[in-house]
Image (spheres, helix red, strand yellow):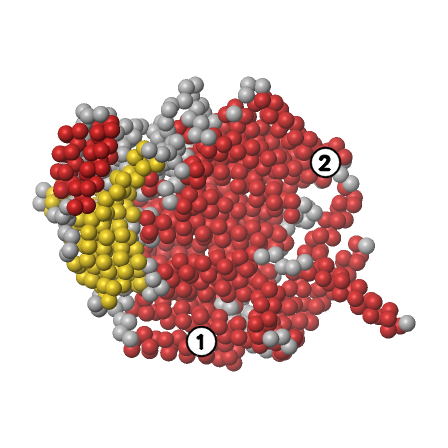
């Protein structure tokens, strides 16, 4: 079936080329049939890439090792879910996923706007197909997923055990959905600029896609952070690693864009700013896609240098050059209809929000690319670490949260003192009360965390007040009960209240980040069984070692050595932690000197032991002392290396027994982090808000038509 | 003051502030950064007390645990020159012989001492064009 | 498998060609479609204008706009909406 997949990709490339030509020709000579044909090429692209993706997935699910990618990224012992997801853990598969998702959203948006934006749509189609052509060309000419070998190896290399976690498998599709969805407003912005139709129409048409892009990209980023915290052995959720940053950049500029378009819709301002933002976001999305596979920056994720550098850099350069040219040459059409009347206005607050977000993006960009910048400027490659990032992003984050409380309630055009008093007095007082309470409770030690808590309280106060007043206003107009009024209020003003929910979620999230960063207790200790360590007010006792063999279908998947820990606070039992270190056998266990030795020479992963709670997480990982371990292993391994397999497997069992009964010291990293759960909780609230804002409004036209008929009936009855 | 003059002043103030902040950012990035070097560079010239971001591969067989410290050697990605490193604390999961690592170190006598929590081990290569080597 | 593969490819090629050439074969009713397109654009603008009017009222009722400001804004927005309705009616 591989030739089918390959043929699909070649056909896809041809379809893209045709579609670009048809759309541009149709736009130039005003022939709607050619434009329609170009639009249908996008549907054709979706069909073909779906077929190609299906071929690839089938190969993975059937463990068809004739396919190179399957042999190198999967194995017969990989569980089915991870087999399916292994498709995009490869370079080729991930690029195919990217273009497949792009084709789906492009088809959707072009179908939805097929009768609108007649002048803009053909150019948008051409841009989207341009991306399609780029990625399919890469797949056809450079990195094909459908390369095969004549004789399939009996077993594949398998999926890296670090990636065998549900979050890690959903993380790439979420990120790629985000990246590819940004291509939609990007393409329409280009189209709008080309035909000089830069009022809010193109924004309205692509708004849901921009919001969906923001939504999925955010989920992807948060999933990565959650995975890092609960699966990796360092206990943190964000390391300012270049690839993490690369995904954050388009999210930051995209968030700015979602806000600033509201100003353009309301007041016809910031047109240049808006198009520049979305063009930058689209470019950063492609940059993010490129960075993870480029090897140009030292990162935990940088998966080696690849030959795709030149094509990607060329694409990014073309996007930047094209964007700059279009914005500069169309600047007359992009003139604002109104001006900023006052610095105390919603326009100004939105502008402030944008400046902060773009500032954050600039800081992250600078820090991420600093090794390349410094090498270009000084000849030495130098890197900045998390402390530098935190120094600038923390104050900006504080301002951002504060603005998210001010923005929703400050008046458009010009805020008066009366207006300010009406809207800010109560929330500000509330925030002050919170400040006093926190100080009274002894929450000192970090000024920035305290400021964040106060700002977040302010935001919560503002949002609560907004909801209260909104419900009140609705009840005054319709005499509904409070619950019904609330539901209808949100239903009929989805964008507004969805947005408020997002702000609430972000406030909660930032409180979690502030608390877990500023007030974390961490200790690295070496314990023997029955020993206790004290961390952050908790007493943690190493109760006993654990050891087990995990096998799948009769084959040893890993041997897990761990410990049970007892957690107490003030004498009360809080819970038990179970943490393990899993040792996966190397790919050729018997070659390296027997099964026993081979078991400890493959990958090792940590199973985090965690007691999560609303107020704090107690977190631990174990590192069994290698010196002790190697003595035991060596003894057993040497004695059994030449013995038959069955005996070697028995020896492994014996090893388990020895570990369980022994008094093995182990290294533990112990963390007590307050309010980490608030980060995930805040994230959930943010996404709920995003869903509310995304949800299509009820079909207003239909209900109005019915109301019209009802009115006519009433009229006729009156007359009769 | 007429509105357009007010606007121009606002613009100038804003731009100046932005430039100053950007300038501060750029300046501190140069002073807060550690040069990224390979072991051969470090061997050639390393200032005591200055922190460097060392990148390279773990030399096979060089990993040794002493209490809660790990001693190992890091060599050039394509080369033999290697330096000894002493790192206190938990090492990342993928840390093994032959893995690519990034660690911030300071020269101290004949050793390079790693900064806490700065040891990063790269996930083994996925997106390469070469077929996966036997791991 | 050997015969199936080319057949599938040819089938897909056929579907795509048929899909893409559709508008060219029927020569899409250009005139009507142009009408429909302008109507859809105006409809979308009208919906957006209605939402603005409702938003403004909500802003006023939750204390973010003074009564005078709201009345002025409401008048302005309604005038714009009426203009959109007029243009829609002109289209027939």
The residue at 13%/42% (across/down) is: A628
What percent of the width, then of the height, locates residue A584?
28, 37
The residue at 37%/71% (across/down) is: A454
Residue holding disc 2: C23
Q: Quadrant of residue C15?
A: top right
Chain under disc 1: A
Left or right? Give the position of A244 relative to A705. left
Q: Quadrant of residue B120?
A: top left
Q: Nearer the viewer, residue C45 or A4?
A: A4
If the image is split into quadrants, where does the C terminus of chain A sit? Answer: bottom right
The label shown at residue A427 is 1
Q: Name the secondary structure under disc 1.
A: helix
To the question of a shared chain for discs 1 and 2, the answer is no
What percent of the width, then of the height, locates residue A249?
42, 50
Q: Quadrant of residue A548?
A: top left
Q: Is residue A690 above or below residue A592?
A: below
Is residue A305 visible to us here?
Answer: no
């Amino acid at each position: 079936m591989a030739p089918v997949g390959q043929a699909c990709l070649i056909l896809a490339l041809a379809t893209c080329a045709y579609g670009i030509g048809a759309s541009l020709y149709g736009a130039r000579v005003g022939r709607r049939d050619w434009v329609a044909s170009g639009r249908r090429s996008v549907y054709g692209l979706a069909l073909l890439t779906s077929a190609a993706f299906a071929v690839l997935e089938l190969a993975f699910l059937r463990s068809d090792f004739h396919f190179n990618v399957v042999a190198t990224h999967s194995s017969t012992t990989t569980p089915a879910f991870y087999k399916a997801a292994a498709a995009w853990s490869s370079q080729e598969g991930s690029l195919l996923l990217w273009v497949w998702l792009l084709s789906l959203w492009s088809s959707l948006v072009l179908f939805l706007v097929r009768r609108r934006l007649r002048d803009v749509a053909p150019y948008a189609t051409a841009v989207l197909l341009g991306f399609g052509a780029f990625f399919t060309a890469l797949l056809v000419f450079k990195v094909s997923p459908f390369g095969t070998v004549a004789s399939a190896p009996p077993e594949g290399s398998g999926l890296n055990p670090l990636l065998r976690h549900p979050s890690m498998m959903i993380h790439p599709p979420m990120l790629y959905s985000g990246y590819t969805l940004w291509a939609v407003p990007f393409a329409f912005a280009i189209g709008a600029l080309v035909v000089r139709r830069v009022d809010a129409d193109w924004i309205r048409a692509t708004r849901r896609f921009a919001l969906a892009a923001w939504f999925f990209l955010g989920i992807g980023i948060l999933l990565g952070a959650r995975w890092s915290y609960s699966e990796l052995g360092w206990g943190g959720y964000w390391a300012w690693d270049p690839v993490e940053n690369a995904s954050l950049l388009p999210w930051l500029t995209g968030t700015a864009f979602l806000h600033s378009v509201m100003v353009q819709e309301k007041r016809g301002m910031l047109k240049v700013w808006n198009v520049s933002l979305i063009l930058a976001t689209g470019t950063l999305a492609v940059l993010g896609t490129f960075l993870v596979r480029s090897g140009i920056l030292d990162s935990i994720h940088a998966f080696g240098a690849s030959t795709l550098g030149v094509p990607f850099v060329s694409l990014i350069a073309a996007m930047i050059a094209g964007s700059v040219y279009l914005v500069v040459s169309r600047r007359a059409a992009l003139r604002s209809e109104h001006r900023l009347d006052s610095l105390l206005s919603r326009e100004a607050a939105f502008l402030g929000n944008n400046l902060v977000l773009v500032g954050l993006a600039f800081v992250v960009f600078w820090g991420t690319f600093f090794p390349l910048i410094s090498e270009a400027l000084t000849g030495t490659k130098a890197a900045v670490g998390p402390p530098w990032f935190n120094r600038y992003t923390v104050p900006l984050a504080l301002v951002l949260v504060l603005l998210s409380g001010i923005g929703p309630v400050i008046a458009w055009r010009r805020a008066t003192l009366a207006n300010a008093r009406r809207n800010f007095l109560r929330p500000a007082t509330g925030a002050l009360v919170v400040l006093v309470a926190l100080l009274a409770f002894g929450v000192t030690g970090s000024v920035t965390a305290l400021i964040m808590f106060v700002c977040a309280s302010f935001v919560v106060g503002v949002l609560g007040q907004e909801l209260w007043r909104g419900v009140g206003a609705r009840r005054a107009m319709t005499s509904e009960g409070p619950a019904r009024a609330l539901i209808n209020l949100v239903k009929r003003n989805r964008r507004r209240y969805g947005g408020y929910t997002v702000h609430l979620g972000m406030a909660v999230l930032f409180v979690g980040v502030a608390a877990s960063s500023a007030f974390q207790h961490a200790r690295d200790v070496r314990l023997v069984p029955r020993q206790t360590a004290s961390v952050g007010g908790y007493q943690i006792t190493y109760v006993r070692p654990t050891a087990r063999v995990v096998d799948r279908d009769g084959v040893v998947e890993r041997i897990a050595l761990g410990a049970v820990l007892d957690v107490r606070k003030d004498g009360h039992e809080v819970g038990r932690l179970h943490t393990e270190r899993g040792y996966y056998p190397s790919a050729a266990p018997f070659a390296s000197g027997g099964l026993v030795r081979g078991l400890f020479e493959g990958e090792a992963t940590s199973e985090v032991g965690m007691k999560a709670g609303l107020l704090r997480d107690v977190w631990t990982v174990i590192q069994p002392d290698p010196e002790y371990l190697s003595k035991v292993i060596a003894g057993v391994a040497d004695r059994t290396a030449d013995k038959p397999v069955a005996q070697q497997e028995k020896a492994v069992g014996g090893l388990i027994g020895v570990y369980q009964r022994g008094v093995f010291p182990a290294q533990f990293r112990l963390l007590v982090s307050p309010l980490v759960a608030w980060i995930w909780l805040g994230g959930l609230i943010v996404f709920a808000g995003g869903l509310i804002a995304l949800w299509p409004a009820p079909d207003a036209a239909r209900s109005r038509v019915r109301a019209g008929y009802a009115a006519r009936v009433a009229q006729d009855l009156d007359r009769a | 003051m007429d509105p357009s003059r007010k606007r121009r002043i606002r613009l100038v103030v804003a731009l100046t502030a932005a430039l100053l902040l950007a300038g501060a950012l750029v300046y501190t990035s140069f002073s807060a950064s550690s040069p990224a070097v390979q072991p051969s560079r470090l061997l050639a010239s390393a200032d005591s007390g200055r922190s460097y971001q060392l990148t390279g591969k773990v030399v096979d067989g060089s990993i040794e645990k002493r209490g809660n410290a790990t001693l190992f050697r890091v060599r050039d990605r394509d080369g033999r020159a290697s330096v000894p490193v002493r790192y206190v604390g938990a090492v990342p999961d993928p840390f093994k012989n032959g893995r690519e690592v990034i660690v911030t170190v300071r020269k101290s006598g004949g050793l390079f001492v790693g900064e806490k929590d700065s040891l990063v081990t790269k996930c083994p290569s996925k997106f390469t064009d070469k077929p996966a080597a036997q791991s | 498998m050997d015969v199936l593969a080319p057949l599938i490819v040819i089938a897909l090629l056929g579907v795509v060609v048929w899909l893409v050439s559709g508008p060219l074969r029927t020569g899409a009713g250009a005139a009507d479609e142009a009408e429909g397109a302008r109507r859809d654009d105006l409809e979308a603008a009208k919906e957006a204008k209605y939402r603005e009017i409702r938003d403004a009222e909500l802003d006023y009722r939750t204390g973010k706009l003074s009564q005078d400001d709201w009345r002025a804004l409401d008048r302005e927005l309604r005038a714009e909406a009426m203009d959109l309705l007029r243009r829609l009616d002109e289209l027939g």
